[in-house]
Image (tube, rainbow, N blue to C red):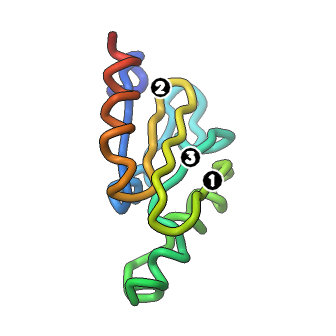
Amino acid sequence: GCYAANGVVGAVCHGCAGLVTVTDLATGDPLVKGKDVTGFSDVEETQIGLFGVVPYSIEAEFKRLGGNYKAAEAWGPLVCVHGRLVTGQNPKSSKQVGEKIAELLA
């Protein structure tokens, strides 16, 4: 995979749900384990009426998998960079995620 080949992996908002099933091939652990990560927060899900409607909470799943989940105030931008993993909390984080990925690829 990309991460195993020293690539950069990034996701924003609900796209971070795609990281829940990703395994670090070097360790066999969840990719998010022990890393600072973010994604759409439970507070944001609740405010838009989707908490309990979406299949699972990104916040809860990252915590369950051993990730160090971080959240800004609802709808505020937040980007977490942990090595080659870049995550953004919500759409306001998109530009910063792209910039961080570009920096890591430079």
What residue is shown at x 48% (from left), y 84% (from top)?
46
Taking 86 as reference, is 104 above or below it?
above
Give neighbour class at mark 3: few <14, some 14-19, many 20+ (Cα, 10 Å): many
The quadrant in which the C terminus is found is top left
Q: Secondary structure at mark 3?
A: strand
Among the two numbered marks 2 and 3 on one chain, the one whose residue lies closer to the N terminus: 3
Disc 3 marks a residue whose amino acid type is: Val
Taking the spot 64% from the left edge, 49% from the top edge, the residue there is: 67
The numbered mark at residue 70 is 1
Q: CA distance from mark 2 to mark 1?
A: 17 Å
Determine crowd level at label 2: few under 14, some 14-19, many 20+ residues with C-alpha closer than 10 A: some
Query: Mark 2 or mark 1, which has the lower sequence index?
Result: 1
Q: Nearer the viewer, mark 2 or mark 1?
A: 1
* Amino acid type of the residue that numbered disc 1 sits on in the rendered structure: Lys
What residue is shown with label 2? Answer: 84
What number is the disc on residue 37?
Answer: 3
Residue type at mark 2 is Arg
